[in-house]
Image (cartoon, grey):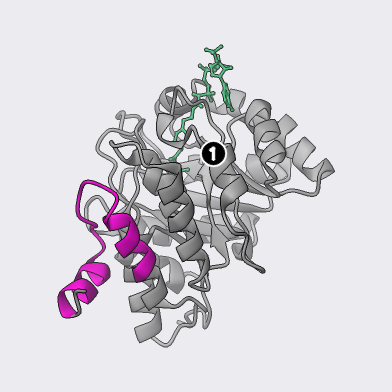
Amino acid sequence: MTLPKRVTIFEMGARDGLQNEKALIATDDKVRYIDLLSESGLQWIEATSFVSPKAIPQLADAAEVFARIRKAPGVRYPVLVPNLRGYTRAREAGADAIAVFTAASENFTKRNINMTIDESLETFRDVVRAAQRDKVWVRGYVSTAFGSPFGDAVSAQMVVDVCVKLMELGCDELSIGDTIGVGVPSQVATLVPLLARVIPLDRIALHFHDTRGTALANVYAGLEHGVAKFDSSSGGLGGCPYAPGATGNVGTEDVLYMLHQMGIETGVDLAKVRAASRFIAGVIDHTLTSKAYQAMEAASPV
Ligand code: HMG
Ligand code: MG
């Protein structure tokens, strides 16, 4: 077993994190949070989403946030878009990297974006075509890949089928999501080799939510099977309002702590991610769940 020597972290706090906060966060605070994350060495920071403001009021200020964040050299700031309308808004705001999103569960897709999986793929066909024309980088999310919140069964083969269709549309990268944090390492060990048969693993990221405490174990299972890109959220923020029971993404601090202690490089400064988390902790109305963040705070509170 050879683990990757270097891993890329795709930071989710500003989008997956802030979309799920009950209180509305001020635009100034979102900008400050992203600017702090930009100082940490992270190369991928999902900044916001250009979805319907009725669906996600928390990110209704996407254009202003995107315009005002400091774009650090070498850092990409993808934004989530559900349709051509979102794509146009994202481009007008200056985005050069986007993410489209569907799922392996029909029930979840319907609740989340009011489309069937096939309809979502048809919608994204036009979005990805426009992105390719504009030389915009595209990520495709496949949510509920390890289980649906609505009781419909999801198999590894269903996930692979959606992934193949997204790659055929022309996505540059896929992120496979455990939206509700039900996945376990044996599922990762089944799914990743199936995916690797049809899609190069350097185009696959894994996206774990830590609802049942299995996210870091799932990251390790991903590493064992050759995945070297993981989504995580500073402080462990995150969740999807359309997935009942979904809580935060695996904490960026937790992933960084584990990887660095194992001698795996990320190029990300853990202390600087913690500084960004500490800032946002002062803005939101609950404590952050990342264990590594909590341990650092307990060891050296300010
Ligand atoms: P709909 O109601 O079926 O579509 O929503 P519609 O076309 O009828 O539009 C409804 C209204 O929204 C209209 O306005 C549109 O103009 C407007 P009205 O006429 O009522 O005033 N609209 C838009 N406005 C701004 N930007 C747009 C846009 N599109 C339509 N892009 C739709 C369908 C997809 C729009 C809606 O369901 C939606 O925006 N859903 C987004 C849900 C979402 O963001 N969920 C969280 C992200 S997914 C996630 O977190 C999982 C992930 O992290 C991975 C994982 O964990 O697995 C990625
Ligand atoms: Mg998510």
The quadrant in which residue 255 appears is: bottom left
- In the image, taking residue 34 as reference, residue 298 lies left or right, namely left
Q: What residue is drawn where x is 45% and y is 82%?
A: 1
Number of numbered discs on residues: 1
* Percent coordinates x, y for residue 278 in the rendering: 30, 64
Q: What residue is drawn where x is 31% and y is 40%?
A: 21
Crowd class of label 1 (few under 14; some 14 to 19; many from 20; radius 10 Å):
many
- On whether residue 215 falls in the magenta region, the answer is no
The quadrant in which residue 110 appears is: top left
Part of the protein shown in magenta: 274-299
For numbered disc 1, what is the local secondary structure? helix
The furthest residue to the right:
133
Q: Is residue 189 above or below residue 1?
A: above
- In the image, taking residue 127 as reference, residue 208 lies left or right, namely left
- On whether residue 283 falls in the magenta region, the answer is yes
Q: What residue is drawn where x is 50% and y is 61%?
A: 35
The answer to whether residue 184 of the structure is visible from this angle is no
Under mark 1, the amino acid is Ala
Q: What residue is drawn where x is 49% and y is 52%?
A: 31
The answer to whether residue 296 of the structure is visible from this angle is yes
* Percent coordinates x, y for residue 83 in the rendering: 63, 28
The furthest residue to the bottom:
263
The residue lying toward the viewer, choosing from 48 and 31, is 31
* Percent coordinates x, y for residue 41 in the rendering: 53, 73
Identify residue for label 1.
62
